[in-house]
Amino acid sequence: MVSVPEHTMEEVPLQEEEEVTMEYRMLMVYAQRSLSESKFLNLQRAISSKGGQTTISNGKEEKANGETKTPKSKHKKKRWPKTLTPACLRPPKSKEKTVNHTLEKAVDPEEERAKSIVSQLQRIVQRIKKQEKESGFRVLNRISSIQQDGDDEDETIAKIVQILRATGDRLNDKITEERTLMEKIKGLWSYSFYKKVTDCFLSEVVPTSDAEEEEQTSKIAMCLHATTALTTLENQPMNKILGFGTRYLQDNYSPWIQSRGGWEKVMGIQTVAEEEIE
């Protein structure tokens, strides 16, 4: 990610396609698997239209302003614009072209890695959500103190977290119903605000554990879950939250992951080399 001083940051720039990180790939895979088809398509469009780039839809090029034009001669090489959506997550142009593309290009091993890692993290999310459902999720520990302190931003964060825990990817619908909250969060979505929301959310849903690996991987899993839900908010760009999530994972967990031998090692995933040895 591009390093930008936090006090000046309003939006974390996303990377070009060839520089896409594993953290970003994981967020996109998780979003594809957990969001509805329409919401994930909206996310793809938000990313593809970033910077006025064009996207391919139904055999025509669509500009960011909604104009369309017929593609030029099919003898010219066609290719996707430099979007930030991994190739495996892009909608196919047609069944025939998809088959040809598959034959021409081998599967990206980094995308396959992301899918394997996310599968493990999804199991953790389901386990935590099941535990909360069985016990009834705990009332936010900070609400009483926040109300006493009268800190408006902290109270807003606590409310978002409370709704996030209860509604998941229906967050936008629930917040829309809370008109006062909608007014409060307009213009608040900087990386600093996202970090406060995510920190608060993780402290509430992930119990402290003596097993460092279990606690850390649980936080990573729930970070993916929360970030995906937050992308559905309609009062800020979806791709902005995705950028925030990528940076948050890199800042807080990627160094720890690497110190433990990498994603596969931590998540208990066998590599191709390990499988061949067996």
Image (tube, rainbow, N blue to C red):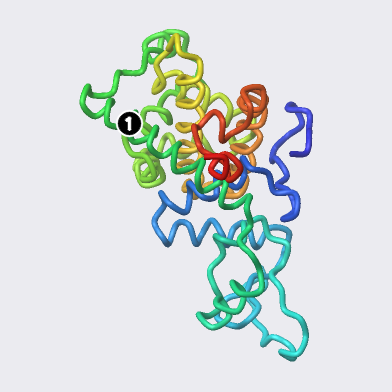
Query: Would you place residue 269 above or below residue 44 in this image?
Result: above
Name which residue lies at 45% across and 36% down: 121
Q: Nearer the viewer, residue 235 or 266?
A: 266
Relative to 253, say whether 47 is above or below.
below
Estimate the x, y position of residue 10 in percent, counting from the top left.
70, 37
Q: Is residue 47 visible?
A: yes
Quarter of the N terminus within the rendering: top right
SS assignment at label 1: helix
Which residue is depicted at the point 73% across and 34% down? 9
Residue at x 78% of width, y 85% of height? 76
Residue occupying the point 53% across, 43% down = 275
| Relative depth, front residue between 96 and 28 | 96
Local packing at callout 1 (Cα closer than 10 Å; few below 14, some 14-19, many 20+) is few
Residue 253 screen position, x and y as percent: 61, 26
**Where residue 34 sits: x, y (%)?**
41, 49
Percent coordinates x, y for residue 200 in the rendering: 48, 21
- Front position in the image: 268 or 158: 268
Tell me which amino acid carries mark 1. Arg
Instruction: Give the answer, above or below, for where 256 lies relative to 222.
Output: above
Which residue is the site of mark 1?
A: 127
